[in-house]
Amino acid sequence: MCGIVGYIGKQKAAPILLAGLAKLEYRGYDSAGIAIMENGNIEVQKDKGRVSNLCEIKEIENLQGSIGIAHTRWATHGEPSKTNAHPHTDSKEDFAVVHNGIIENYVELRKELEGNDYNFKSETDTEVIPNLIHYFYSKDSKNDELKLVRAVKQATDKLIGSFAIEVLSKENPDIMVVVRKDSPLVIGKGYNENYIASDIPAILSYTKDFYLLENLEFAMLSRDSIRFFDKDLKEFNKKSDTITWNAMAADKNGYEDYMLKEIYEQPTAIRETIGTRVNEGTCKFDELNFTKEYLLGLNQIYIVACGTAMHVGLAVKSTIERLSKIHTEVDIASEFRYRKPLVDEKTLCIFITQSGETADTIAALKLCKEKGAKTLAVTNVIGSSITREADFSIYTHAGPEIAVASTKAYTSQITLLVLLAMYFAQILGTMEKQELENIIKEMLVLPNKLEEVLKISEQIKEIAKQMYKEKDVFYLGRGIDYATAQEASLKVKEISYIHSESYAAGELKHGTIALIEKGINVIGIMTDPNLVKKTVSNIEEIITRGAITTVVINEKIAQMLDTSIFTNVVKVPETEEFLSPIITVVPLQLLAYYISKEKGLDVDKPRNLAKSVTVE
Ligand code: F6R
């Protein structure tokens, strides 16, 4: 996690770096710091807390330098404190480094360096890096233009773990060196200036031309040049990519919080994700060259992901099975990778990840590749780490998702996977043409239906007012609605800190119903006419025990029930069964949002969390 930014150009670096950090704060927000090359000296300023604290440091205003690096931290080694904040310097203060990732062997390296008269100030793993660079730099008798990049390479050769690093050097005041391994880093190309960041949105307002640094590639930047070197320091030319996201997409754009903006962007995100993938009643995935023979030969599909992305797997598992008739399993990446999964060359492994950077998901993908399976990444970020590992990548087009709690990525991912299930069914001939056309027709009007759902936000605000002081809340559903219950429960937990549980409605009476007492809030999701009677009888059992009930239902279900038994009834438009999780989750995202607002919490940056989990 952690976010890093860098600037080398002709403008004052500090304001650019601080603005970049503010945009990256979702990656970590327990301390922040900046280092500027100032008249041949490296000036470091840092503090505990948010980027706004850093901005208040008076000395930063006086920094005139036009080269600098900056960092916002999510603590792994060492508590959040000013001393542990980045940038870190070597003990002679000749080099400054910011780092995103984890150095697993830092204890041994630190001991070795201490034996060579290097002193340490912080408890971080990072501090070994500037000291190692100093060590190798001072040992190198060759004083050529590549001396710094050589020292950085020798230092990184010693590191076990993951890193994205930016390095400033007092002796080389007009250059900066960067390198990455298993942590993201992009370089933005400007005119007589260059930018560095962990994620594209941080520097999107300055440039649209980016270099996506691969593992163990080094870059040496000056104001008007970027030189690339491979892991053996052989120089090579790299092609830049042009990003089509606009800068507004990475701003709040008038909304109070990114999360609210992203909830409201869902109709557009889904429209964009469908894009041109449907054409005259068929689904197109030209980038996948799957044949009928290959799909028929599959023993199963494995969907592997973390958190909300894993809930997408749960929401589409039965859709894939029912449409394509291929057995489908869903697993949590951090569990999957350690339990010797039954995966072989006849398995198709699908990895869902908004960021494309989640360490456990990437490790699970590597494991499946080793076992000979084909791997398919479903991500929102073009050029992200997972896309460089996977055999195939398909993209949601949700635009940058900044709020820590995922919303538009979730609904876009379900949309893309339902399209994928239909594509499999098309190839295999497991679906009637008419059925396929019906789902596509319904999918195309889905964005309009979502716009309808977003109009009920006032009702949801009122329910949030009733609920925000609660300590516990339960979510229930059956079938596809159970997946929505799980996602809704995670949303309320992570941004409003209310303890919440989700249950398959039929499971309640096997234990959990013992927790139901007078006044407890239970939320039921019911969209399947075949299951509704059963779920209602489960809800009646808890109403009898004094629970306050809120149900999310569609028009058809409303006609089948006496809704007067529920405390709150949230009605959403009816849609195709496979698409219903895309609609039903939206009022529940809003509910979590408004509860968090009622509690006065920071919706976009919930405590202890960060957007990209690049550590295991
Ligand atoms: C919850 C949330 C997380 C992520 C999870 C995986 O709102 O956002 O649970 O879904 O950390 O992240 P990605 O999709 O980037 O792999």
Image: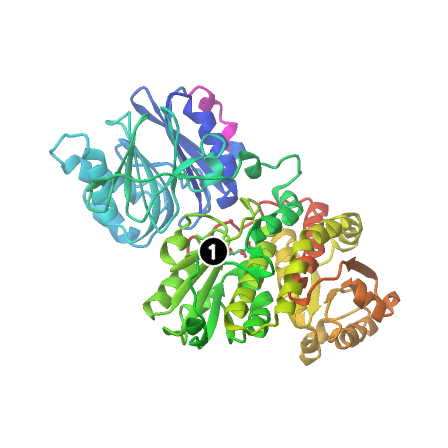
Quarter occupied by the C terminus: bottom left
Looking at the image, residue 544 sits to the left or right of residue 170; the answer is: right
User: What secondary structure is marked by label 1?
Assistant: strand
94 is higher (above) or lower (below) than 307: above
State the colouring used for the structure image. Answer: rainbow
Q: Residue furthest left?
A: 141
- Mark 1 — residue? 394
**507 sits to left or right of 218:** right
Check disc 1 and give the amino acid type. Ile
Is 387 above or below relative to 532? above
Q: Which residues are magenta?
A: 54-63
416 left or right, relative to 76:
right
Residue 114 visible (yes or no): no
Q: Residue at x 30, y 51 (%)?
A: 106
Q: Residue at x 51, y 72 (%)?
A: 428
In the rendered image, the vertical position of residue 607 relative to residue 31, given as above or below: below
The quadrant holding residue 526 is: bottom right
- Residue 60 on the magenta segment: yes
The picture places residue 199, in percent across and down from the top left corner, at 45, 42
Q: Position of residue 108 (x, y in %)?
A: 25, 53
Does the stretch in magenta take in 260?
Answer: no
Crowd class of label 1 (few under 14; some 14 to 19; many from 20; radius 10 Å)? many
Q: Main secondary structure of the magenta part?
A: helix
When asked about the image quadrant of residue 169, the answer is: top left
Q: Is residue 418 left or right of residue 73?
A: right
Q: Residue at x 76, y 58 (%)?
A: 572
Percent of width and height locating residue 10: 38, 21
Q: Nearer the viewer, residue 535 or 162?
A: 535
Q: Please tell me whether residue 234 is drawn above or below residue 414 in the rendered image.
A: above
Which residue, as the protein is rendered here, is positioned at the far front?
A: 280
